[in-house]
Amino acid sequence: MPIAPRLERFLSLRGIAFRELVVPSASSLDAAVSASGRSPNEFVRASMLIDINGPLMVVHGFISSIDPELIHRVTGRRLQPLTARQSSRLFLDCDPGFIPPVGAAYDVPVLVDDDVRHYSRVVMACGDDSTLLEMDRTSLTRALGDAMAGHVVIRGQNNGERDSLTLEEVADQLQKLYRLPPMPALALRILRLTSNTDASAKELADLIEFDPSMTAQIMRYAGSALFNYPGQINSVQEAVTRVLGFDRVAHIALGIASVRAFEIPRKGMLGMDEFWRHSLYCAFLCQRMASRCGEDKGLAYLCGLLHNFGLLLIGHLFPAEFDELNELRESNPEASMHSLEQQVFGAGDQRQLLAVGHGAIGGILHRLWQLPDPVIKSAGMHQHPDYHGDHEQYVLMVQLANALLKERQIGDEFNPDDLPALTSALDLEEQDLDTFRDEVERVSADLDALARSLSS
């Protein structure tokens, strides 16, 4: 299927000229663009929106991001992004994520961004994951027909990479479209307490003991073989002062309380059971690495523990799509999470907000919740292997921890990482990795038991 049949029929009937560009079969339009060897600035794409009056296709530059407020001004409509499932019903003859930006071929009304009209030549998806179409301006104009036009993209986005949006810009647009969960009250109180340098173990214990379920979990954690405490632990305060320490208790309690903001199914590779398992293992490894790298151990633990909250937010906002993502993760272990997220949510259909990946989404949430900057950066950038910038060491520790956990089939993706590069960037040696592997093996049964306890 080099070209979607409906598109091919439409172009043929109208005598619209085009040229086919063959690329290796790609998991997403982003991957196809990269494989084509052409500049992303030559591409246009379709973002699908919907309201009670039906769907609308917005055609815009590939590296631009549509603005819902500008679209409202042009159309008078309050539109929401289509889900991948809704899009698949409209474009039955298209591979997921490869919707042709020619709405007339599918009887879908079109709004085209003003900038597209000035392209001298464009490349676009044609419904097939191994073929692209190239058109000149005349052919594009005929393909768009009498589409509505207007300025509908965020200013300044046509000349940069799509990933160059700052967290603040994406957060602003995300909040315009969706209701984000506030930090749970108990988590907020714990966070405020940890920011007080004069806070005592008794104050932390009193706060935790306010919640019987959390009290039981902290007591179980302190009594686990992870710490081999020989005596009896009779209270949370004793767990803090004798076994765990203030920071560790505060951080695990913060994680427990924060997770309560989300309703996520337990089962599956992305379910709550595996979320806690992945988070606890990652936190453990990050803390061990921090000791070798001269970084704050408590902060490193928190970075590892909370780095994957973006998946929880996606599951909270889009339960049906999260279930689909969970199934795809199970059946496509070799694929990257980024490509699977784009397949479910559409390459650009969610106007880049979800296409940026769960990491950036988690970073946005952590920033809104006013968590420490290294935690924000570790969540937001853990999917970016070439990241260089603020709090880079904490991001690298999370990335290296995840790379090591892939060896144990723990985590949300299993495509290989550049272990030597990550190791070198942290000034570690291969023997350090062997030590980390041994330490994880030693505590794996206890971490698994703790994960089961926290997810139940």
Image: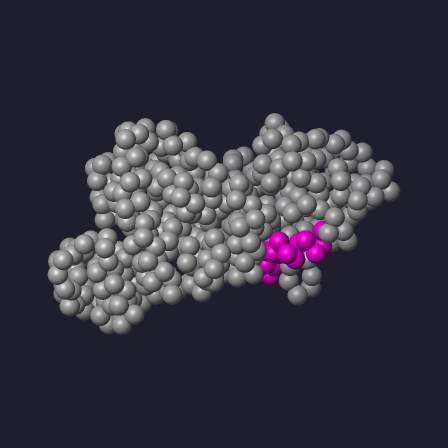
Q: Nearer the viewer, residue 238 or 85?
A: 238
Question: Which residue does the image show at 45% across and 65% down from the upper left?
Answer: 263
Seen in the picture, residue 227 relative to 145 is either above or below; the reply is below
x and y percentages locating residue 80 in the rendered image = 59, 59
Q: Nearer the viewer, residue 333 or 53?
A: 333
Question: Which residue does the image show at 18% across and 65% down from the upper left?
Answer: 236
Whether residue 76 is in magenta: the answer is yes
Q: Quadrant of residue 386?
A: top left
Q: Is residue 390 visible?
A: no
User: Which segment did they paint magenta?
Assistant: 75-91
Whether residue 1 is in magenta: the answer is no
x and y percentages locating residue 8 in the rendered image = 80, 41
Question: Which residue does the image show at 29% across and 70% down from the upper left?
Answer: 213
Q: Nearer the viewer, residue 99 or 455?
A: 455
Residue 45 relative to residue 409: left or right: right
Tally the marks.
Answer: 0
Q: Quadrant of residue 287?
A: top left
